[in-house]
Amino acid sequence: MPATKKPGNRQQDSGRSTPGSLPGGSIGSDEFAVGRYGKLFNSFNIDSEGRISAVELGVRLRESGILESDPRVADVWAELRHAVGDKGQTWIDLDGFIGLCKNGGGVVEKSIRGDFVIPDFAALQAEISTIFEGLQSVHGGHVADYIPQLGRVDPEKFGIALCTVDGQRFAIGDADNLFCVQSVCKPINYCLTLEEHGADIVHQHVGREPSGRGFNELTLNSDGLPHNPMINSGAIMCCSLLRPAWEMADRFDHVAETWRKLAGGGAVGFNNAVYLSERRTADRNFALGYFMREHQSFPTGTDLMETLEFYFQCCSIEVDAQALSVVAASLANGGVNPLTGERIFSADTVRKCLSLMSSCGMYDYSGEFAFVIGLPAKSGVSGGLMIVVPGVMGVCVWSPRLDAMGNSVRGVAFCKELVNRFNFHVYDSFAAGEVSGKRDPRRGKIEEEVASTIRLLWAASQGDLDVVRIALATGKDPNSMDYDRRTALHLAASEGHLDVVRYLLDRGASPTVQDRWGGTPLSDAQRGAKGSVVTLLESAAALVV
């Protein structure tokens, strides 16, 4: 067999590979492919034979959030597993690497380039893990014991999973434990009714305003309709609109199949015990149904008992946090599943659904949640919480302990931590996201470093001590430089901002650092005749050994 060629030796290719190398096929003459993928190949550690490690490639994929269960790269992972086998290390030549990139449909290439929506996914994983560990000590709230089966769930269960619109995934804790979606089914059923009937017809039977009342309260709006689709009465109404002429089994299959499509192959099932338990303790939901029928809210010909049974079945659909995060990511991606590329809902349907999730998705806490968190979300009394960061990612938190309003205690606490660390709040783009010290994970390491340096230097030049404090509080080096090697102390000294100069010196800024022209903060202050600053910097410079 021919010896493995080093990158650049592209005269011919027999279609065979050396022992220990992945086969690449007859692509040696494809100079365009060599040019496109050669630089990516060279970003790995290359051995003396001009090959890279299959293990290192697998590590790079996982670090970027591309998991073995991703259907887009199933063939890639299969080849890597087969190659490594029991040997522990197998090498890939350039041809083999190009073949893997092509088999991955662009996912492998984007992963190595860092072209995903979250370029530094490993950093995001670390942040989520830190939040998870910090919430382990939160034990407030109680499980939903008014439904007997839910009351038996271990209250200490806790899992977090996320999926980006590029299919990057991460999970921690009990993210593979199944739980019933309960009220998290409401956004999905609402989307289905919009797809089937359109908004005009749907909202002839259900409103779209927050109720200001309990999620299961016996109340209707001034038109005799449920206030919105995110409370029990509105969800029951949506069930009456879903394929009403079909047999019950077919109606449920329609909903369950939609969940499977949204989850992209994730775990989706049905918990019959919860269904029976909920049905037996559903006096309030029966009362809501009869109340709406009394007000003639339902479409003509609605079978109330069948509608209620259908509603209980939808609430008893079972998922794990990983699957629900992909469902949320499908909504974040405008109705397209990021793992399969399949469009499940139209972008207009998703826009309407997310609008109501933002205003009505968190029971009586919806207004406060919109104010503090600023993200569309839907909670369920099983402890599940589905959060959507539009255009970025979907998140699921599962923790069964609930607060007085029926929301997961740890779930809400997680959301607060998330938006405190990252500028995900819908209005963070208005100044606060630029000066609050929040990070934008949509930027890569280099972009974020440059942006934070610019913020620090600009604040120093303007004498904005508050922003300087915030920048340094987030860990920014006070001696960070621009391309001219000028620091915040150079700029503050040039402009004579004494308070900023004093603060920077107290935080370790060097008074003797030189810019590209040899200028120091002291010489800049002297040139500008900033007397008080000159005196302070002379004292500081004298202390430097």
Image (cartoon, rainbow, N blue to C red):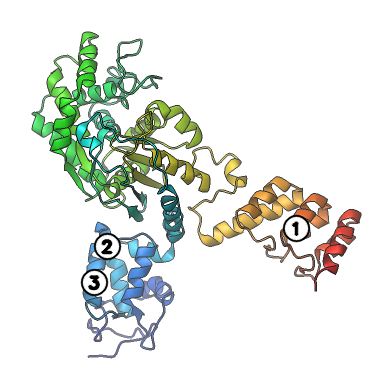
**SS assignment at label 2:** loop
Q: Which residue is mark 3?
A: 81
**Disc 2, disc 3: CB below 8 Å?**
yes
At x 19%, y 25%, the residue is: 281
At x 35%, y 34%, the residue is: 348
Question: Taking 90 as reference, is 481 above or below it?
Answer: above
Question: Taking 328 as reference, is 62 above or below it?
Answer: below
At x 27%, y 83%, the residue is: 13
| Direction from residue 115 to residue 190 in the image, left or right | left
CA distance separating discs 2 and 1: 50 Å
Category of crowding for the residue at label 3, using alpha-carbon neighbours closer than 10 angstroms: few (below 14), some (14–19), many (at least 20): some
Q: Position of residue 438 (x, y in %)?
A: 55, 48
Q: Sequence order check: which comes first, mark 2 or mark 1?
A: 2
Amino acid type of the residue that numbered disc 1 sits on in the rendered structure: Asp
Q: Position of residue 226 (x, y in %)?
A: 30, 18
Q: Which residue is mark 2?
A: 68
Q: Is residue 509 visible?
A: yes
Q: Sequence order check: which comes first, mark 2 or mark 3?
A: 2
At x 35%, y 72%, the residue is: 57
Q: Which residue is mark 1?
A: 506
| Direction from residue 338 to residue 483 in the image, left or right | right
